Image (cartoon, rainbow, N blue to C red):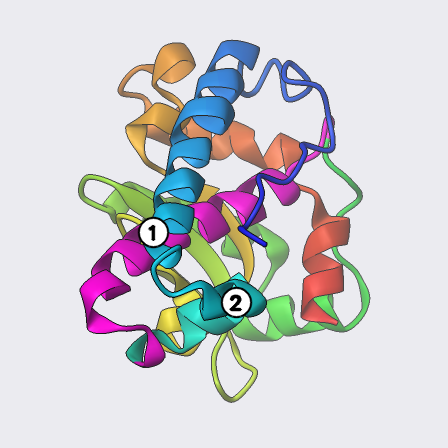
Amino acid sequence: MPFELPKLNYPIEGLEPYIDGKTVEIHYTKHHATYLANCNKALESHPQFFEKTMEWILSNLEQIPQDIRTIVKNNGGGYYNHNLYWENMAPAGTKEPSGKLLQNIETSFGSLANLKIEMEKTGLARLGSGYSWLSTDKDGKLVVHSTLNQDCPLSEGFKPLLVVDVWEHAYYLKYQNRRAEYLTNWWNIVNWQVVQERYS
């Protein structure tokens, strides 16, 4: 079966006032849906890959036939990255991390506040389009890093936990060129429960 667009866990306007409903509508029904459609279309010529998960596909791009590899990398990455982005947000957010995740955040960054600063700095430093991530590396260590365009951490050997989209279409209607303000406000709607589940 072709991959499908996951349903949002909140109404289109549910992330207001931090992300406006019109932005969510365009971002989800146009940008996200287009990445999905393009990826499915590319995979139609090699339908055996519909039996795999998108996580497997993006972690094993060298096994994707060369004639569709770049299309799948870009559009499959866009599909998967957006799945995580929508999932790791919630109206009014959720309580902050605890337990082992919080301990490792404090070990790696000094504090949760420092992690936030680091992710914002990384998001601001991304020239053009991309993402800022909290991931674990192959040794299980927490790292903050950035990817370009629709590149996915899975393709680089990382396990993604938390992501913020810094493409202009993610924030431009409300914030125009004020990416820093968007990144700071975004913490109000982070779904830490989902992040905790991914980490576990």
Amino acid carrying label 2: it is Glu
Residue 191 position (above or below residue 73): above
Is residue 134 rendered to the left or right of residue 67?
Answer: right
Quadrant the N terminus occupies:
bottom right
- Disc 1 marks which residue? 122
Which of 148/114 is in front? 148
Quadrant the C terminus occupies:
bottom right
- Disc 2 marks which residue? 55
Q: Can residue 143 be seen in this view?
A: no
Residue 135, given in percent of the width and then of the height, sits at 51, 67
Q: Report the predominant secondary structure element of the magenta stretch.
A: helix
Mark-to-mark CA distance, 1 and 2:
24 Å
Residue 61 lies in quadrant? bottom left
Q: Residue at position x 40%, y 28% from top?
A: 170
Residue 158, magenta (yes or no): no
Q: Specify the segment rendered in magenta.
A: 63-92
